[in-house]
Image (cartoon, rainbow, N blue to C red):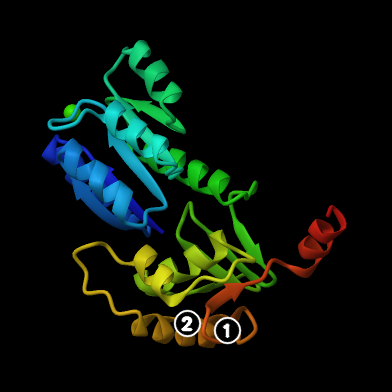
């Protein structure tokens, strides 16, 4: 999963980025509104952390531009302490959640996990597919209850596929969601990560749709239930 952080306080921006990288996300940062708006409109993000007071274009305008263009990326806004009118304006402009400064990094991470969960239609905090369980709270992956050690990239590929369970994800989409912008992106490496994930988590977990990409299917019981529901 890949997150964009738009925050003009350079120290805070770096602090947020480091916490997100530790949390298993690919992260792009930006300290200015106009560039931030452009990045959000042109790159593929799973969520955005958006400060409202920004040079260039203010955060509310950034958010309004995205929503007017139909960009539904989940957004958590950062507001000044006590500025309740800002929070109301932010939520009305299309923010999914907010956090007033100063805040604890752990709370920002929890709010991001919640908006990511909602945007992918999952209710439980853990993602489960058969014997494999991914817990975004700890970045831990287990198979039959046994911890499995994954590299940061393997984890991001797995997290993206599990958040998008039942959907086929192309190699291009996967590389856009597991690498930050300044990384050398090569969609061929995705194949390598998939091969390693299969070796560590079982051959059947990830289905290859030839020419289209990869997919993790929801557990059978869940799939049957959703079919029954129509
Ligand atoms: Ca600011």
Work out whether residue 89 or residue 225 is closer to the camera in this orientation and state it: 89
Label 2 sits on a secondary structure element that is helix
Where residue 96 appears, as percent x and y from the top left, is 46, 33
Which part of the image, by quadrant, shows the C terminus? bottom right
Question: In the image, is residue 171 above or below residue 75?
Answer: below
Q: Which is in the foreground here, disc 1 or disc 2?
A: 1
Where residue 57 appears, as percent x and y from the top left, is 19, 31
- Asked if residue 107 can be seen in this view, the reply is no
Q: Residue 183 has which mark? A: none
Total count of labels: 2
Residue at 21% in and 74% down: 184
Residue at 61% in and 72% down: 216
- Asked if residue 55 can be seen in this view, the reply is yes
> In this figure, which residue is indicated by the disc labeled 2?
194
> In this figure, which residue is indicated by the disc labeled 1?
208
Question: In the image, is residue 67 above or below residue 1?
Answer: above
**Circle 2 crowding by C-alpha within 10 Å: few under 14, some 14–19, many from 20:** some
Residue at 37% in and 60% down: 24
**Circle 1 crowding by C-alpha within 10 Å: few under 14, some 14–19, many from 20:** some
Residue positioned most to the front: 69
Q: Quadrant of residue 163?
A: bottom right
Label 1 sits on a secondary structure element that is strand
Check whether the beta carbons of the residues at disc 1 and disc 2 lie within 8 A of each other.
yes
Residue positioned most to the right: 228
Task: Say if disc 1 is inside 8 Å of ligand 1.
Answer: no
Which part of the image, by quadrant, shows the N terminus? bottom left
Where residue 220 appears, as percent x and y from the top left, is 78, 69
Question: Ligand 1 is located in which of the four quadrants?
Answer: top left
């Amino acid at each position: 999963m890949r997150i964009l952080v738009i925050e003009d306080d350079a120290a805070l921006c770096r602090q947020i980025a480091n916490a997100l990288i530790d949390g298993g996300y690919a992260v792009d940062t930006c300290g200015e509104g106009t560039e931030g708006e452009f990045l959000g409109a042109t790159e593929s993000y799973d969520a955005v952390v958006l400060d409202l007071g920004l040079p260039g274009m203010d955060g509310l305008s950034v958010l309004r531009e995205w929503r007017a263009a139909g960009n539904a990326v989940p957004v958590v806004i950062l507001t000044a302490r006590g500025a309740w009118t800002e929070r109301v304006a932010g939520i009305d402009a299309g923010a999914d959640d907010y956090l007033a400064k100063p805040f604890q990094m752990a709370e920002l991470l929890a709010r991001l996990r919640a908006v990511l969960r909602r945007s992918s239609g999952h209710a439980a905090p853990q993602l489960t597919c058969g014997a494999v369980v991914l817990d975004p709270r700890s970045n831990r992956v287990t198979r039959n209850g046994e911890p499995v050690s994954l590299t940061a990239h393997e984890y991001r590929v797995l997290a993206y596929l599990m958040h998008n369970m039942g959907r086929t994800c192309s190699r291009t989409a996967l590389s856009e969601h597991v690498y930050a912008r300044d990384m050398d992106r090569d969609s061929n490496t995705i194949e390598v990560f998939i091969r390693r994930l299969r070796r560590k988590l079982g051959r059947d977990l990830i289905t290859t749709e030839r020419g289209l990409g990869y997919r993790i299917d929801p557990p059978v019981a869940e799939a049957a239930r959703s079919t029954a529901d129509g």
